[in-house]
Image (tube, rainbow, N blue to C red):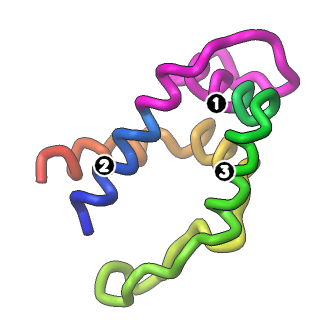
Amino acid sequence: MKKNLSFILILFIAVLTLLGSSSFAYKAPADNPCANSINKLNEAYETNPVFKMLIDEAFKNMQQVPSDYSKKGNPWIGKGFEDLLFFLKNGLPSCRRLLVVLIQD
């Protein structure tokens, strides 16, 4: 399970890195170390209908994690793309720590 999560996180970071840039409504704060990647992700969501559909479907089909994996359940159930932007903008320090732990495992 941890290897799958590691792969998903690495794939997500790769997608953020590879996306192009232009002007769009949402802009991450400039002091955020990942502002460029967050802005590129949002731009892709706003301008690429296939990418938007895939992201929306992923959130609609979010599954619960096994109880022995997390007692609190999957925090992404019932969330959407806007919640992901909020998490990336505000929750990245803990996300970076999680990624380091998963990669080392």
The disc at residue 54 is 3
Extent of the magenta region: 14-41
Q: Is residue 40 magenta?
A: yes
Q: Is residue 33 visible?
A: no
Q: Nearer the viewer, residue 29 or 16?
A: 16
Q: How many marks on residues?
A: 3
Question: How many C-alpha atoms fall within 10 Å of the one at disc 2: few (<14), some, or many (≥20)?
Answer: some
Q: What's the distance in space between the residues labelled 2 and 3, CA to CA?
A: 18 Å
Instruction: Find disc 2 in the rendering and name its residue.
Output: 7
Q: What's the distance in space between the residues labelled 2 and 1, CA to CA?
A: 18 Å
Q: Quadrant of the N terminus?
A: bottom left
Residue 21: percent from left, percent from top = 67, 12
Mark 3 residue type? Leu
**Which residue is at a point 74% across and 49% down the rendered structure image?**
53
Disc 2, disc 3: CB below 8 Å? no
- Marks 2 and 3, the one that precedes in the sequence: 2
The disc at residue 41 is 1
Mark 2 residue type? Phe
- Marks 2 and 1, the one that precedes in the sequence: 2
Mark 1 residue type? Leu
